[in-house]
Image (spheres, helix red, strand yellow):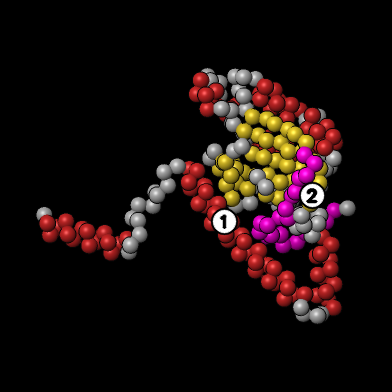
């Protein structure tokens, strides 16, 4: 028995090579989300550094054709969301119902949580209201941004974020609020937010000093033509 146990210990040590043989090191989803988000942010930052290096090398070529193309690229950076925007606007916060409501409710549990379509509806209404720039959880939203559910979080540009979901839009506050107030799907959500049996979270407030940082995600568009 001693020889057998010793053999197993040696085999285990060689197999693990000093690492944990059990990959389930995370005790909760929040820990996993946090770790994956940190890795994604680090990789994105590395890509941005390389993109900046490529741009600097391109600008240093001194070629007329390259300079002309670079000028076209620079003129499209703002509408593509690649420059910072600041100004007045509105901030909307969506959140799941409190745990006490969910545990005591006999309603469909889907009514108590924020879904990706809720976020998409708010964002689309803000665009329709003339928003100059929109962020979710501080991330700049561009035309290629996808908003997807991943468990009890949303996946945004490769990074998972838990609720509450903070959506900020820069533009004329009154126009943006009018667009929100006139959307029937949002009206339904707000009615559910006011219903104590459902109690999903809804907050909307004006802000005079919003800042939407430039988009820092990956750019995988092969060909795009801006609309008038």
Give the magenta part as a residue range: 207-227
* Circles 2 and 1 in contact, beta carbons < 8 Å: no
Instruction: Name the image quarter holding residue 77.
Output: bottom right
Give the mark nearest the N terminus, 2 or 1: 1
Q: As rendered, which of 93 and 224 lies closer to the eye?
A: 93
Q: Is residue 136 found inside the magenta-colored segment of the image?
A: no
Instruction: Please give the name of the residue rendered at 48% of the width and 46% of the height, measured from the top-left corner.
Output: 31
In the structure shown, which secondary structural element does the residue marked by tag 2 occupy? strand
In the picture, the disc for residue 86 is 2
Q: Position of residue 120 (x, y in %)?
A: 70, 39
Instruction: Please give the name of the residue rendered at 76% of the width and 78% of the height, measured from the top-left corner.
Output: 60
Say left or right for 90 vs 150.
right
Instruction: Please give the name of the residue rendered at 59% of the width and 50% of the height, measured from the top-left corner.
Output: 159
Q: Is residue 220 found inside the magenta-colored segment of the image?
A: yes
Please indicate, yes or no, whether residue 124 appears anywhere in the rendered image: no
Q: Give the class, few, some or many, for how many residues have Cα within 10 Å of label 2's Cα (few <14, many ≥20).
A: some
Q: Position of residue 205 (x, y in %)?
A: 75, 34
Per the image, the residue denoted by label 1 is: 40
Q: With respect to residue 125, does 190 lie above or below?
A: above
Query: What main secondary structure does the magenta stretch of the protein show?
Result: loop
User: In what quadrant of the picture does the N terminus appear?
Assistant: bottom left
């Amino acid at each position: 028995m001693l020889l057998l146990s010793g053999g197993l210990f040696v085999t285990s040590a060689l197999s693990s090579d000093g690492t944990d043989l059990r990959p389930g090191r995370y005790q909760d989803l929040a820990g996993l989300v946090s770790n994956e988000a940190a890795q994604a942010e680090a990789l994105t930052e590395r890509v941005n550094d390389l993109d900046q290096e490529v741009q600097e090398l391109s600008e240093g070529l001194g070629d007329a054709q390259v300079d002309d193309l670079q000028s076209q690229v620079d003129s499209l950076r703002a509408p593509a969301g690649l420059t910072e925007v600041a100004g007045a606007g509105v901030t909307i916060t969506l959140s799941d119902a409190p745990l006490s409501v969910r545990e005591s409710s006999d309603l469909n549990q889907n009514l108590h949580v924020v879904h990706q379509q809720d976020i998409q509806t708010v964002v689309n209404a803000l665009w329709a209201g003339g928003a100059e720039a929109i962020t979710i959880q501080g991330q700049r939203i561009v035309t290629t941004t996808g908003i997807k559910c991943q468990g009890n979080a949303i996946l945004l540009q490769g990074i998972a974020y838990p609720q509450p979901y903070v959506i900020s839009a820069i533009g004329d506050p009154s126009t943006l609020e009018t667009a929100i107030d006139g959307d029937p799907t949002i009206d339904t959500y707000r009615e559910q937010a006011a219903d104590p049996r459902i109690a999903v979270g809804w907050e909307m407030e004006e802000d005079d000093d919003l800042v939407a940082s430039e988009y820092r995600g990956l750019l995988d568009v092969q060909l795009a033509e801006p609309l008038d």
